Amino acid sequence: MATALVIIHGLVAVALLGAITHQTLATWAPAGSRPGSFFGRFRAVPSASFTNAIVVLYAVSALLGAVVYLFFRVDVRPELERDGHWQALGFFDLKEHFISIGLGLLPAYWVCWRKPLADELGRTRAALTAVIALIVWWSYLTGHVMNNIMGFG
Amino acid sequence: MTYSPSFRRFAFAYGTANAVFYVVALARDLALFTVFPSLGVVLLGTHHSRDVGDPSLGFLAPAIYWYGWTATAAIGALIPSFIATFFPEQWTRRIWLGWLWVVPVSAMVACVYLTMPWFRL
């Protein structure tokens, strides 16, 4: 049960990572990219079309993570404490905190990306997208390391 | 799908308020409830194992506070967000939009500071 949930959680996280990375890079990439270049094609994708998917994937991923956390707290974390993986546990705590802060940002993020895109929200939209991308990347990498840490150690 | 100006005020206030409330909940250990997954028990408020028995019980009955901190912040942030929906448009137009990302980023930095003890062990 826990293994299946972790795998589903990981797959949802990969989809979220792809969507938010694409949207962030398309938002922040310079507008002068050559039309036929990789970045040119990358940037040509309408970024706003990712918004609903990102909100849903973030919420589903957070929910699955919250369920998996029950197993982690009982079966995994005591082992990590016994082995003295304090820094990894610190990084994981940060992941929890960042995710909760990111959850609260989702309504504002959604509003910022609603069409027609409001000009006065341009910088806020870019900054919020970058913050959510940072949270998603941190969470993905930390979760991935925690999933494999006993294999590393 | 579109949104009303009052929903925009709600959403912007909620994002910032949730970040502030989360840091306060974390710093002051204000979990709305505590979950003991191995026992299948949920208690209202923050409960540390040493409150009810030997400290070693913490290993036998690990507690989860993260759900409680998140709930504290999520519910607490509703109050200023609902109040913000009643603000006139000309008031909120004067508020710098940058607070919407500056406050959460500051909250994340505060979380890093509050998590530092893990890195000194």
Image (tube, coloured by chain):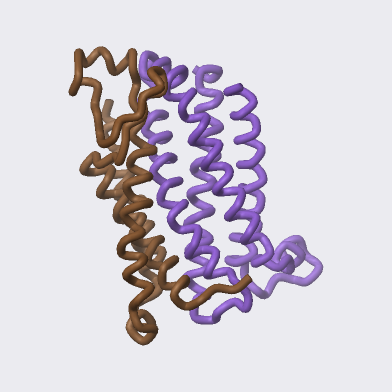
Chain colours: A purple, B brown
Question: Which residue is depicted at the point 64% across and 26% down?
Answer: A4
Q: Is residue B36 left or right of residue A111?
A: left
Tell me residue B39's x, y (percent). 38, 18
Q: Front-most of A133 and A4?
A: A4
- State the residue lying farthest toward the right: A36
Residue A11, above or below B20? above
Q: Front-most of A153 and B49?
A: B49
The quarter in which the N terminus of chain A is drawn is top right
Rendering quarter of residue B33: top left
Tell me residue B94's x, y (percent). 34, 83
Residue A12, above or below B78? above
Q: Is residue A38 left or right of residue A9?
A: right
Q: Front-most of A89 and B79?
A: B79
How many numbered badges does the structure rendering display?
A: 0
Q: Is residue A78 left or right of residue B116?
A: right
Question: Which residue is depicted at the point 50% across and 58% down?
Answer: A106
- State the residue lying farthest toward the bottom: B90
Residue A57, above or below B80? above
Tell me residue B69's x, y (percent). 33, 42
Tell me residue B61's x, y (percent). 33, 17
Question: Which residue is depicted at the point 42% across and 40% down?
Answer: A96
